[in-house]
Image: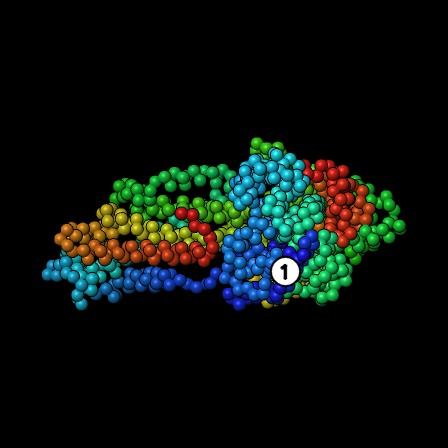
Amino acid sequence: MTTPTMAMKVLRAPRVRRSSTTFLISAVFLGVVTLAAIFAPLIAPYPPNQVDLLNIQAGPSPAHWLGTDALGRDTLSRMMFGARTALLAPLLVVVFSTIVGILLGLLAGWRGGWIDSVLGRIFDVIFAFPALLLAIMAVALFGKGLVAPVVAMSIAYAPFVARLTRSLIASERSRPYVAAYRVQGFGGGFIALRRVLPNVMPIVGAQSTLNFGYVLAELAALSFLGLGVQAPTADWGAMVNEAQAGLIGGYFLPALVPAVAIVLVVVAVNVIGEELSDRIGGEIPA
Amino acid sequence: MTLLDISELTLDLPNGKRLLDGISLTVAEGETVGLVGESGSGKSLTARSVLGLLPSRATMGGSVQLLDQSVLDASRSELLALRRTRASMIFQDPRAGINPMRTVGDHLTETMRLCEGRSAADAKAVAISLMEAVRLPRPEEHMNQYPHELSGGMLQRVMIAGALTSSPRLLICDEPTTALDVTTQAEIIGVLAEQRASRGMGMLFITHDLNLAASICDRVYVMSAGRVEEQGDARQVFSNPQAAYTKRLVAATPTIVVARDSAATADQGADASATTSDAVPSTADAAASASASATPAPVEAMLSASGISKTYVRRGKEPVRAVIDASIEIPRGGALGVVGESGSGKSTFARMIVGLEQADTGDIRIAGRERTSVPSSRVERLEHARSVQMVFQDPYLSLDPRITAGKAIEDAMRLHRNLSTTDARARVIELLEQVGLGDVHAQARPRTLSGGQRQRVAIARALAIEPDVLVMDEATSALDVSVQAQVLSLVEEIRRERGLTVLFISHDLAVVRRLCDETVVMKTGEIVERGRTIELLGNPQHPYTRLLIDSVPRPEWNLEAVAAEASELEDPVAQN
């Protein structure tokens, strides 16, 4: 009954579509880090665990661009190998939590009713536990290493994705195009999985990208606490931990390099995630 | 005295797009000036420029003089003063224009207390007298009510009262009745006309409805694509349009006035008792109808629904009886219109017929098969879909934004028939051509198509399934008049070619007249009158039908008579 009028749309100043410089820098930075991680065995100047006791706590030099640590191991090489666990583990968490979250969110949002209520309460319970606490509990139960924390963090992060998916699906479900599919004779499963889900995926994807940053920081914290990646394997969080002792002696570099790397990657991921969600135009609940 | 003088107004966006191109218009004291045009014509933008509500970073040219003050180069405080004392604006959607968390009283007294420094008691007295002036039934009570407690029509009265608090010299109305029912529209227009007359204000009235403009305006400006196409005396422009655009627009506007004349002549020959309010239209009657579609004499009802009822039970509230014992029958190839205002249950009725909702009681049969129950298997579901298809109101929402037009049609087609990809593609192009689109549109996503094109895609998608019955739920209401005319002729053509049976749901009597042989009128869930459309319009039996017909704006519109009729039917304000 209402006549759509262009006037309201026009009043908003047209937005200039342009990738921001920070977005490009972040993307390039993440690309470089990822490539370094993938090709670490080929491009790293030294094996990550090669001890050189004659060259401990060395400053930057042509031989060791980022210096060496307390055991004389090359920091740059360890950073490259460390990036593999630092990036791969959060990636696994994001993939698992997204898959589980989407499935549960779809179920809750599409079916509604008691399924929605029960799942909602379960999510609330999981929300009550900080992800890091869940991960530490998992380590306590199943032993140190990356497997238990990755599983625990996947469980902890799935409700974020699920709750977002649920609300998106629920609002999408009441739209006329879904009714139109029903009238055409399409089955509920087809409409939900093949038609509605792809329409909400961009927003869910942006949320998952943001999650990646948080998970990376939390897993690094876990390794720093000595509960994640175990020595002598190179990992950014573990490297900060190992370099603690050196800090008292005034050797900042071995701790500073991985710490800065963690911060930069998290910031870069957040920049990209927010830019993506801006472009999609969806609101990402915190 | 000239209140508003816009001359050679231009507006350019930073991207070089010119939205207004040399608009000139004047409004004198006590005069109602209409600004008529379709969406995107720039009519709202022109009106907004009067109050300095302009897009950011737009470049303006020309001049806007409001009471000898230039608006375009006014400072912020000058603009504020203009808005506070000289001109007010009423917007289309009253619900969007009023703060839902504040009471009606707050809304009305706020500006008086803050801008004019009146005391709370004084402001309240003024607000109450204004509410009386716009004929709100219980002003004292409304002061403490929240917007959600009032109907759309009452809220629009509140907005009008709010606009009048500053005693403006110029009142700008931007489609103030577009979101309202026809009977409510007639009441609101009555209030506006009365206030304009008693205050001697000038009024700039923006609308897309030619009939409405013709009935209330002294002069009109017809706009298209940012230009004024024609201007002049309101009646003159519509009875004898000069510009090609106006001619097209007038021709495209459906009207019920002609129906009365032709019905009058038809009545002489026809038996006057043919239209009785409760008689189920017999198939023989429809066959005899001269305006029935060119199909062979129908033998059985294609769609028959009998005794359909639906009640919504709400927790902690009174249950709502959306549809009460409604029965319709459409012969093969026939077209039945269901007319009613919002809340009449016409859409619920349509949704039950296509199976989107389940009726509490009653029986729906399509092509002789029972279609009341929920399909329990895939086969039944597909059979149900082949028996009835639906075209929805808003083509912006009823198409999946991600799926191209061609794919949407192809999917629907291949769900129901085994076709090879190439056969299906060829058939899709065929269908698109049938609805006036081409193979270029097959690759287009909905957002790149215009409203009319989208609705054509939606129609093609419904036809792809080759249904027995096509239900159109307000299928042209969201479209501009010229586009609406195109879509209506398309539907007429398809009916002729395929002998399609159509159930057409609409609030617009004129549109129904154009398309449907027979019409039923629904009011609060009940069918109050039924009969051949021409007879129903020419010789309405039920007082509500008469009110509906008389509420439709036309040049010789008698608002007082409409108001009298409304109060006769029941207390109209209590209903709204």
* Residue at the right extreme of this rendering: B269
The quadrant where residue A52 appears: bottom left
Relative side of B115 to B137, left or right = left
In depth, the one of A202 and A286 nearer the eye is A286
B219 or B92: which is nearer to us?
B219
| Of B178 and A228, the residue lying toward us | B178
Q: Is residue B237 above or below residue A126?
A: below
Kindly identify the residue that appears in the image at 64 percent across and 39 percent down.
B129
* Quadrant (top left, top right, bottom left, bottom right) of the C terminus of chain B: top right
Q: Position of residue A39 (x, y in %)?
A: 28, 64
Q: Nearer the viewer, residue B474 or B494?
A: B474
Residue A260: x and y, percent?
26, 56
B233 to B358, vertically: above or below: below
Question: What residue sits right under mark 1 in the picture?
Answer: B5
Residue B565 place in picture, x, y as percent: 76, 41
Quadrant where the N terminus of chain B is found in the figure: bottom right
**Residue at image x 70%, y 58%?**
B220
Judge whether residue B470 can be spotted in this image.
Answer: no
Query: Looking at the image, which residue is at 45% across and 51% down?
Result: A283
**Secondary structure of the residue carrying numbered label 1:** strand
Q: Position of A154 compared to B317: left or right?
A: left
Query: Of the residues shown, which amino acid type is indicated by label 1?
Result: Asp
Q: Is residue A119 above or below residue B50?
A: above
Q: How is the image coloured?
A: rainbow
Count of all numbered marks drawn on residues in the image: 1
Residue B2 appears anywhere in the view: yes
The image shows residue B250 at horizontal and vertical percentages of 73, 60
Label 1 Cα crowd, 10 Å radius (few <14 / some 14-19 / many 20+): some
Residue name at image x 20 percent, y 64 percent: A65
Q: Chain of mark 1?
A: B
- Viewed as shown, does residue B181 lie left or right of A276? right
